[in-house]
Image: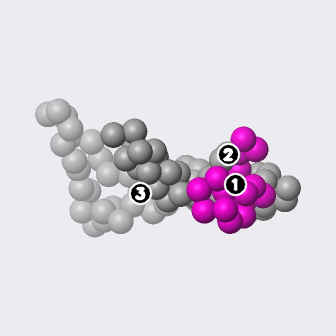
Amino acid sequence: MRRVFKKVRHVEYDYKTIKNPHFDPQQKLQYEYQGFYYPQKEYIQKEIPKNTYRSSSHIEYKIKCDYCGGFGWVRRRDAKFCCGNCRKLNYRDNKLKKS
């Protein structure tokens, strides 16, 4: 049994006040929304993604594979195979034996 640590990326969204790139003080730009005209604001609030990393851990168990006989690290204690390939090959072999 071993404990594996890794960093997982998590995206959070944060509101930030930024200067409006379409704002022009000489021209009072307006935008139309459903027939109404609204003046452009100099500063607007925008939702900006922010990456945060947090540590995550899980336990892995060392088992002997029923198909290939090798050893492998798996996350489930009751796993029979070391990887997905061995699991698929075992299923196909059993299917051929039955027919």
In percent of the image, x 30 and y 62: which residue is there?
22
| Residue beneath disc 2 | 79
**Going 72% across and 41% down the picture, which residue do you hit?**
78
- Foreground pick, 74 / 95: 95
Q: Quadrant of residue 71?
A: bottom right
- Residue bounds of the magenta highlight: 62-78
The x, y position of residue 90, in whole percent, is 50, 51
Q: Is residue 50 left or right of residue 96?
A: right
The local secondary structure at tag 2 comes to loop
Crowdedness near tag 2: few (<14), some (14–19) or many (≥20) residues, C-alpha within 10 Å: some
Spatial distance from mark 3 to mark 2, Cα to Cα? 60 Å
Q: Are marks 1 and 2 in contact (CB under 8 Å)?
A: yes
**Helix, strand or loop at disc 1?**
strand
Q: Nearer the viewer, mark 1 or mark 2?
A: 2
Which residue is disc 3 drawn over? Answer: 42
**Residue at image location 37% in from the left, 47% down from the top:** 96
Residue 53 % position (x, y):
69, 60
Q: Is residue 63 magenta?
A: yes
- Where, quadrant-wise, is the C terminus in this rendering? top left
Amino acid carrying mark 1 in the image = Val
